[in-house]
């Protein structure tokens, strides 16, 4: 694949392209690759209009990159995004069958939007474009593009986990979805577990065969399924942590906690992140280690997310209730154990908070990767690094084994890990941190992007490019 071939990226939301201190790892990595090759980034505008996906596309050119967005109607948004992506696929792929809502109408709209997006995108495609589709919003998109006659290279990356076959099989239309995924030439996952779950589904439910070199064969179609753990712009983030704005926020946090040691958590308010379990662990710490009462403060940064979805409204109630309970139980006149913030922060401010933290709690019940863990590592100061407490169920666990690894469901275990982190000697903190830093800097967002695109080039799909799912 020559550097001249144009890269086309498809994701639910596009940009930002320029890093004004707002872009996350994904946007930074992709923007970098798009700038290098020149390219097109296609997605939803974030607007709902009467015509929706049928309406006019907006086009904006920034340097070598063209951003193209389309709107959705209220019905499309409700079915595709809120109903199917967020209430069926998100919980299903995060191992939460108890929270799943399968709705026939939402399923229909999800497939229709995938078909519609393919149709709109096709108008902008050249035959030799390389198309890279992102995430669980677009499982059917590759198949639809093939139906539209696109013959170029097609890659797909899943940012979130892939659940075990026995669980995934609960999705009505699960076979359709996996067959549609076989239209991609390369399918990328965050971890070996996710890849294995997908491969086992293809094997057991579709009579697939595992082949050498990360290849999977189903019928006469062979594709590549491979692991690409996502990284962050480590250098950029470390620089944010040294900025004046970061310093200011670090100082604010320190003066707010006074003589206490700051413990932080940073997550969208989402049930997959294990925020409730983490608070229970913190509460247990205060029970088990009474010396810590008055000596630690827990700050949870939790921007509200998907507030239109019932499960998220329930979670917010539970979260606020639990924080109230812990504070009511342990607070003194001059000390409050838990502090919460639901507002957004700039990347620099966030980096400052990580830097000032003595402990960072990343305890998802299930997470594709979790970039907060890597950002926390990148933000530390070698002279006095904080300790990462990391869930065994985060994708990041595969790389960051020097963190204190916990089972987030085991409340005592979490409490003991916090205590151990608070007591850890400077020498041990530095030793663990250096090992993690080396890994975070050795696999950045740009490396991830390059690895995926190289593999897409090298993938030798077999069985034609015709759509597999009618
Ligand atoms: P997310 O579920 O969004 O991503 P995560 O990887 O932790 O989870 O990324 C969250 C990002 O939001 C981080 O970059 C964090 O700094 C930022 N953020 C959080 N709170 C913020 C605040 N208050 N203000 C500003 N920024 C804030 C999905 C998957 C993950 C996977 C990523 C990338 O669920 O598992 O790691 O995609 O593939």
Image: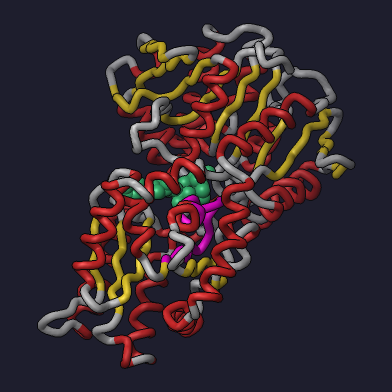
Q: Which residue: 38% across, 84% down?
A: 285
Q: Is residue 386 visible?
A: yes
Q: Is residue 125 above or below residue 333?
A: above
State the image coordinates of residue 341 (x, y, percent, origin top left).
Answer: 24, 58
Q: Residue furthest left?
A: 333
Instruction: Please name whichever residue, 103 or 251, is drawn nearer the observer in this view of the structure.
Output: 251
Instruction: Give the answer, above or below, for where 463 lies relative to 97.
Output: above
Q: Residue furthest right?
A: 212
Return the x and y of residue 267 as percentages of the image width and height. Answer: 38, 55
Residue depicted at x 37% and y 58%: 354
Q: Which residues are magenta?
A: 360-374
Q: Residue furthest front?
A: 383
Tell me if 319 is positioned left or right of 185 in this view. Answer: left
Instruction: Where is residue 439? Give x, y as percent.
Output: 62, 53
Q: Position of residue 348 (x, y in %)?
A: 33, 46
Q: How is the image coloured?
A: secondary structure
The relative height of residue 21 versus residue 407 in the rendered view (above or below) is above
- Residue 126, located in which quarter of the rendered image? top right
Q: Work out whether residue 462 or residue 444 is closer to the camera in this orientation and state it.
A: 444
Is 421 included in the stretch rendered in magenta?
no
Left or right, 120 with respect to 221, comes to: left
Quick check: can you spot residue 99?
no
Q: Which quadrant would the N terminus be assigned to in this image?
A: top right
């Amino acid at each position: 694949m020559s550097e001249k071939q144009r890269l086309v990226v498809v994701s639910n939301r596009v940009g930002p392209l320029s890093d004004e201190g707002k872009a996350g790892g994904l946007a930074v990595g992709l923007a970098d690759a798009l700038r290098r090759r020149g390219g097109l980034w296609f997605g939803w505008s974030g607007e709902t209009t009467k015509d929706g996906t049928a309406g006019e596309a907006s086009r904006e050119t920034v340097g070598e990159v063209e951003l193209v967005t389309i709107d959705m109607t209220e019905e499309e948004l409700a079915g595709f995004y809120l109903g199917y992506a967020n209430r069926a696929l998100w919980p299903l792929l995060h191992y939460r069958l108890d929270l799943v809502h399968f709705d026939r109408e939402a399923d229909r709209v999800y497939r229709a939007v995938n078909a519609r997006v393919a149709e709109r995108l096709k108008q902008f495609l050249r035959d030799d474009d390389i198309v890279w589709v992102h995430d669980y919003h677009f499982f059917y998109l590759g198949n639809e593009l093939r139906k539209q006659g696109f013959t170029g290279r097609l890659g797909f990356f899943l940012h979130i986990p892939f659940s075990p076959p026995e669980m995934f099989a609960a999705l009505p239309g699960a076979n359709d979805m996996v067959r549609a995924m076989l239209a991609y030439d390369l399918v990328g996952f965050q971890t070996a577990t996710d890849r294995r779950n997908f491969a086992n589904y293809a094997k057991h439910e579709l009579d697939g065969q595992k082949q050498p070199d990360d290849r999977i064969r189903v019928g006469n179609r062979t594709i590549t399924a491979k692991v690409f753990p996502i990284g962050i712009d480590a250098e950029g983030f470390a620089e944010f942590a040294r900025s004046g704005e970061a310093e200011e926020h670090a100082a604010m946090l320190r003066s707010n906690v006074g003589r206490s040691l700051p413990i932080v958590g940073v997550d969208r308010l989402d049930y997959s992140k294990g925020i409730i379990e983490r608070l229970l662990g913190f509460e247990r710490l205060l029970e088990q280690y009474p010396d810590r009462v008055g000596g630690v403060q827990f700050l949870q940064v939790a921007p509200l997310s998907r507030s239109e979805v019932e499960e998220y409204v329930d979670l917010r109630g539970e979260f606020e209730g639990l924080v109230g309970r812990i504070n009511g139980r342990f607070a003194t006149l001059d000390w409050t154990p838990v502090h919460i913030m639901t507002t957004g922060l700039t990347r620099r401010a966030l980096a400052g908070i990580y830097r000032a933290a003595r402990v960072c709690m990343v305890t998802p019940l299930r997470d594709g990767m979790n970039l907060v863990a890597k950002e926390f590592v990148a933000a530390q100061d070698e002279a006095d690094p904080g300790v990462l407490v990391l869930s065994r169920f985060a994708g990041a666990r595969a790389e960051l084994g020097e963190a204190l690894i916990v089972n987030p469901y085991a409340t005592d275990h979490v409490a003991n890990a916090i205590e151990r982190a608070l007591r850890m000697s400077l020498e041990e903190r530095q030793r663990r941190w250096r090992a993690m830093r080396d890994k975070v800097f050795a696999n950045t967002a740009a490396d991830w992007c390059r690895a995926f695109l190289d593999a897409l080039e090298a993938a030798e799909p077999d069985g034609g490019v015709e759509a597999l799912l009618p």
